[in-house]
Image (cartoon, rainbow, N blue to C red):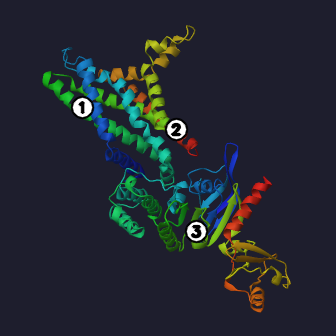
Amino acid sequence: MIKIKSLTKKFDQFKAVSDLNFEVSEGEVLGFLGPNGAGKSTTMKVITGFLSPSAGTVEIDGYDIIEDPLKAKELIGYLPEGAPCYADMSVLEFLSFIAEIRGFRNEDAVERVQNVLDLVDLQTVCQQSIDTLSKGFKRRVGLAQAIIHDPKVLILDEPTDGLDPNQKHHVRELIKNLAKDKIVIISTHILEEVTAVCSRAIIINSGEIVADGTPNELEARSKYHHAVVVSFSEAYNPQRDLSELSELVVVEENGNASVTILSNNKSPIFNKISEIARTKNWPISEMHVNRGQLEDVFRVVTSQMRECD
Amino acid sequence: MNNLSIIFRRELLSYFATPLAYIFIVIFLITNGVFTFDLGGFYLRGQADLLPFFSFHPWLYLFMVPAIAMALWADERKTGTIELLLTLPIKLSEAVLGKFLAAWVLIGIALVLTFPIWVTVNYLGDPDNGVIFAAYIGSWFMAGGFLAIGSCMSACTKNAVIAFILTVSICFTFVIMGSPILLNIFPEWVPQYLVDAFSTLGFLPHFDSISKGVLDIRDFLYFTIFITAWLLASAVVIEIKKAN
């Protein structure tokens, strides 16, 4: 269990994080979202004990990160932004070093390193020095050092940033597999990642939480939640047929003879639309309900704040 | 094996994983040779001691040690590994000391490898080996002083070159402290005891007495306190400047 209470971090006059409150419990994969400079990395640096908070407390499984830093840090595996590693060491040397610092000795350390090499698929390059590796491999080395001690808390700062789609998929699968009975916090600005791996998402903007919920809940806040997307096989204007509907609807052109129909109060309208489509003989090639767009919610909650400023 | 020795070992190994350690040692040995035999007039003096060898060490260290020290923390900051290192379950003191000791031992290794000069002087004459041994230890302690300054300067900046220049400047001040150049800066009204106190803060008086075989515990204490103070300063600087 991670408890974060009224966490504030100031750099001189600039408030990077202000009065953050949240808790994360075992089994949760928390996606930490926000535009660049919103305070994601700063929050993670404070949680992992790299930076000390200006105010507030961080508790990892009952250990305060300021009062009991060593105990708290033992529980955490951390992948800093950009996955920094000692580039002049080989993968094997680097991971052995981390294993020893994490308290494993001799055969124990060797076993840990071998396990983690298998887990992140690094066996083929384990003798190479880290600075000769590609970005994807480097990221995996960073991930390996974070999970080598099977930590209770896993904190990953942009774990898939700069990876190709295959590598992204691999890292996400890895995170999903690791997540059982762990606390995982991932920061990202890739929204598809949240739907792919997270059980909960927090959106922060200018150092404050602006949204907190499951990805589904957040999607439901989108104006496109329950909207119906209709593609026509030929050009067709559905506008006049829709005037029969009891609620007010808006039709947005998507181009390519496709439209999105959304009701003003986000109520489910699929049945009614399909009824109309059947009676009016719409030349439909495809029709589906939009679950809502995280991107849309993200934009709305992070831009509202700016306007207030 | 505790965290300190794990960090120490990693640092020392990484010196030898790159050409850095070898280049350092080779250049150190060559310059030592040139200084001792050419400039120091080792043969011409006709004396069986290593005084010309040791008397150049402060000037040699002035450039060699900052070159080793400049990357200590500046590189960690630049590559971001400082974030990795300081979020591991270790104390900051273990990291500062481990890194310092690794670099100090590297200098020690270079120093030990100058042994042919000791063999030479023993072959040619009958030197006082106790004095030579003491001078070696004194030299190593002085290098530690240079290195501790370098550690602190390296913690101040992300840029290793800036760290190098800062370290050389401060080390130079401590080398010439006590020499007339610096003492003449003091105006007349400054009491003599203050000037004396100031001049004893420099490296040379302490190193000179050790290298002449005068083993005074106070000289070693001076270097030990000096190193401790600068390492403490390093830790403070790292703590303050972590964020940027």
**Reading the chain from its start, which is encountered first: label 2 or label 1?**
1
User: Please, which chain is the residue tagged with disc 2 on?
Assistant: B
Q: Tell me how far mark 2 sits from mark 3, CA to CA.
A: 36 Å
Q: Position of residue A32 (x, y in %)?
A: 62, 63
Residue B49, relative to residue A279: is it above or below? above
Q: Position of residue B204 (x, y in %)?
A: 39, 21
> Pointer 1: residues within 10 angstroms few (<14), some, or many (20+)?
some
Identify residue for label 3.
Answer: A193
Q: Secondary structure at mark 3?
A: helix
User: Please, which chain is the residue tagged with disc 1 on?
Assistant: B
Q: Please, which residue is most extreme toward the top here?
A: B188
Mark on residue B114? 1
Amino acid found under the numbered disc labelled 1: Thr
Q: Tell me how far mark 2 sits from mark 1, CA to CA.
A: 33 Å
Q: Position of residue B125 (x, y in %)?
A: 15, 21
Q: Please, which residue is most extreme toward the front here?
A: A235
Q: Please, which residue is most extreme toward the left here?
A: B123
Drawn side of residue B109 relative to residue B97, left or right: left
Mark 1 or mark 3, which is nearer to you? 3
Q: Position of residue A62 (x, y in %)?
A: 60, 63
Drawn side of residue B144 relative to residue B123, left or right: right
Identify residue for label 2.
Answer: B157
Q: Tell me how far mark 1 sits from mark 3, CA to CA.
A: 59 Å
Hey, which quadrant is residue A61 in on the image?
Answer: bottom right
> Is residue A236 among what the camera can see?
yes
Q: Nearer the viewer, residue A127 or A225?
A: A225
Q: Nearer the viewer, residue A209 or A306?
A: A306
Amino acid found under the numbered disc labelled 2: Thr
